[in-house]
Amino acid sequence: MNLKYAGILTAFAVSAVMAQDATPVATAPTAPSAPVSAVEAPSTSAPESAVAEAPVESVSEDFSAEPAAVRGADAAQPVKKKKKKFVYRPVYSPSEIESRGPVKTIYVSEAPKADPVDMDQLRGLIPLKFTFGLQGFIGSSFLSGDNGRYEYDRYSGLTWNIGAFALFPLDEYNMAFKTGVLFEHDKVSNSYNDYFNDKYGECRVSFSQYRISVPLLLSLKSARSNLFFDVGVQPSFAVADKFRIRHPDNTSYKEDMMDEDYRQALDWSIVLGFGIRANRYIGFDARFSWGLNNQYDDYNKWPINNLSSKSVAVGATFYVF
């Protein structure tokens, strides 16, 4: 009986080894046993044959076909739908990168614009940025002395100027320094009736001035507005100044005030102004200037009483960016 049980256990052990192997295993020979009786032989031969000769199926799993996570340019493309354009951006968290976890992809229905809306625009704020450009003004100029007590010391006419400017922000939204160079021309005149050489008639006096001015302005505005106010001073350097008078007898007299050293080389003015930047490239301005010094000294050929200039002008500004 011990030999019979030993043969059965050997058959089960061989079957277990064959099931773990990837390829079919041939039937292992059983250990030699002693002769058994005729009564015991039929009961053991059938089970041993069935177990030893039963086919064992080998299962081989192929893990190479399992999808792997991909990133960047190799990420899976989104499903295309009609009449819609999709873009995708892979998004990773630090834990996913370290653990090589699954890749997340978000889909946006609209492609990003060239000029995305920043936080200042969302909050309605208009920041100050460095810029420069060209500007020009046209308006009225006034030359007067001693508060215009006399008819012959009040002159008025046309003024214009053109030049370049630059804007330097002093903070993010409210304050900037504005400067530049302007080429200016004033032509003012006055006429009145008077005697000359025993003849009474109209006498006409005019000044034609050219100068280069350098405005030094502090520009102020609200954080949510394109409207700004300017205040500051402006030194002006005289380039040319022609004085002319026509008498009632049609005789005239001309004088170059610069050549004769009657004209001050430097004038100072207080400047006030305001304007609005209509869009990125165009703005509109208005300025008022008040002269602080006497423009002429020691001129005895004509009664010039402490003449100083004032002007008011409007203009346009063209920004480069």
Image: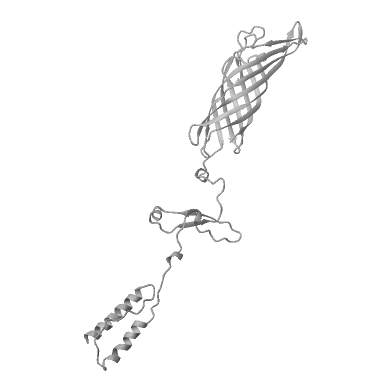
Residue at figure coordinates x 32%, y 86% from the top left: 47
Residue at figure coordinates x 66%, y 27% from the top left: 138
Which of the 4 image quadrants contains residue 312?
top right
Which of the 4 image quadrants contains residue 289?
top right
As drawn, the residue found furthest toward the top would be 197
Residue at figure coordinates x 68%, y 14% from the top left: 242
Task: Depth check: give the residue in front, 175 or 58.
Answer: 58
* Residue 20, placed above or below residue 284: below
Q: Please state the horizontal and vertical placement of residue 257, each as a whole percent of the image.
A: 65, 11
Q: Is residue 197 left or right of residue 168?
A: right
As drawn, the residue found furthest toward the bottom would be 39
Q: Please state the horizontal and vertical placement of residue 25, each as a whole percent of the image.
A: 36, 76
As drawn, the residue found furthest toward the left would be 2
Q: Is residue 281 left or right of residue 224?
A: right
Q: How many marks?
A: 0
* Residue 93, placed above or below residue 39: above
Q: Is residue 298 left or right of residue 31?
A: right
The colour mode here is: one colour
Q: Please state the horizontal and vertical placement of residue 223, each as a whole percent of the image.
A: 51, 38
User: Which quadrant holds the N terminus?
Assistant: bottom left
Residue at figure coordinates x 70%, y 17% from the top left: 190
Q: Please state the horizontal and vertical placement of residue 285, each as a whole percent of the image.
A: 61, 31
Q: Is residue 315 left or right of residue 117?
A: right
